[in-house]
Amino acid sequence: MKKIGGLYRRWLLNTVAVVFTLGLVCVFAVTAVFATYYYSNMQSDMFNRAESTAEFFEDYLSLNYNDYYQSCITYAQTFEDRNIIELQFINASGRLVASSYGPWAGQSPTTPEIAQAVSTRGVQPFVGADPVTNERILAVSAPMIYSNGEVIGVLRFVTSTRQLDLQISLVALVAFSALMVILIVMLFSSKYYIRSILVPIAEITEKAKRIAGGTYGIQIEAKYDDEVGELVDTINEMSNQINQNEKMQTEFISSLSHELRTPLTAITGWSETLLASDQLDKETRRGMRIILREARRLTEMVVELLDFTKLQDGRMTLNIEQADLRAEFEDIVYMYGSRLAQDGVQLNYIDNDEDIPEIPCDPKRMRQVFLNILDNAAKHGHDGKRIDASVHEEEGYVVVRIRDYGPGIPEDEIPLVKKKFYKGSSKARGSGIGLAVCDEIVAMHDGTLTLENASGGGTLVTVRLPAAQ
């Protein structure tokens, strides 16, 4: 499911995230267009009002100042749009003279467009925060020029942009809501499409893992006629080819192993016969011992190969009976100990007084497991000159531990040492399938075989078998 989740996240990132980003850009663009349009229209309307009102007051500019200002007050009081726009008259010194909001309209405005209208003698706009109230406003100021050419004041229209900003915010909200609706529809409408990809991939992944785990020949149901179907056909063909190759390899190994046993038996028998003779000189006897030792080693490898082919074919069976595993193990230790002593390796059996019950197992196969582990300990831990072995009963399990004092196993190789044909960085001779066979035999007993680096150096192998089934 992690793979599926990863594909789904990738789809969200590459599709939904891109659409969402582009949608946000569109939302900002639409909002900006509407904001520009609304502000432009309002500002244009205010410009027209200011220009037309200034032209209207040109007839009063020939009057004296008092009559002129009285006409301004009267016009402000009768201004029809006072509910949405404030009309102000400001004298040349910047003091508020009249307002459509009444004689107590507030402080005199200080926005910069007032001074600009006076200095440029033209209509000037302002959009921003009112320095007095901090409210966002739109203001337009037009100069009022007396008949002698003197600017005697400013006519100013001002309105709050609150409603305008709310309307723009509403447009942005509607645009964003439309984007979210599109994304939701997109997610739901593509759900079937995504599942049509993820579900087959999940099935293919599960079957591919089984093939990688050794279940060769397994087939995936071919129910797709697209690229997924092509992938299914390819994996099915690969599975069949691997299965055929594996069968050919197993048959070849089995046939070769059987063919090797006959000459090896002859070599071993004649070597033992010749060594029993007293007519061999020292050098010849030494050579015959080497021949016998190597013949036995090859015989052990042939047995391992035969066991391996049985495992591959599923032909390996167990002859389960109640057995004293400790007695079996002690026989192996004492028999193998004398052989190790000749090579300068001391095999220490740590005896104990525990009452270890008989367990259901195949004694022959378990002796094979213990011999293989001891042989590995001798080969890979020879430099330590010592091997410790013990048997205990722990929480319903009979536990056998074998430890050498060699260099140990590289940490990155520990998960791999039980895989078939894996030899790692060790230079010791061997087929690389002994531990794989042992692990399978122990697993068939519902037990476990673990390898780890022991504290203080060396390798610790633990075989754990249930005391009852």
Image (spheres, rainbow, N blue to C red):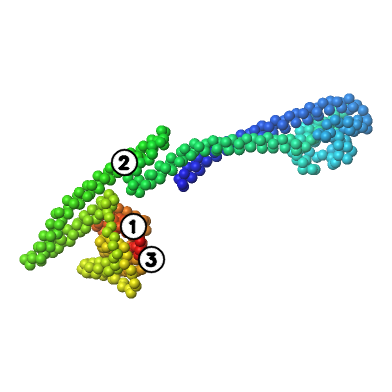
Q: CA distance from mark 3 to mark 2?
A: 43 Å
User: Which of the pair 357/426 is nearer the observer?
Assistant: 357
User: Which of the pair 410/326 is nearer the observer?
Assistant: 326
Q: Is residue 168 above or below residue 461?
A: above
x and y percent of residue 251 in the render?
23, 47
Q: Secondary structure at mark 2?
A: helix
**Most distant residue in the bottom direction:** 353
Q: Does any portion of residue 391 appear in the rendered image?
A: yes
Q: Secondary structure at mark 3?
A: loop
Q: Amino acid at mark 2?
A: Asn
Quadrant assignment, res 444 = bottom left
Residue labelled with disc 3 = 396
x and y percent of residue 270 in the render?
11, 60
x and y percent of residue 267 in the render?
13, 57
Quadrant assignment, res 162 = top right
Q: CA distance from mark 1 to mark 2?
A: 27 Å
Tag 1: Cα neighbours inside 10 Å, few (<14), some, or many (≥20)? some
The label number, if any, that marks residue 126 in the structure image: none
Residue labelled with disc 1 = 443
Tag 3: Cα neighbours inside 10 Å, few (<14), some, or many (≥20)? few
Residue at image location 61% in from the left, 38% down from the top? 180
The label number, if any, that marks residue 240 in the structure image: 2
Q: Is residue 291 above or below residue 351?
A: above
Residue at image location 85% in from the left, 41% down from the top? 106
In-image side of 469 versus 149 (left or right) = left
In-image side of 379 versus 57 (left or right) = left
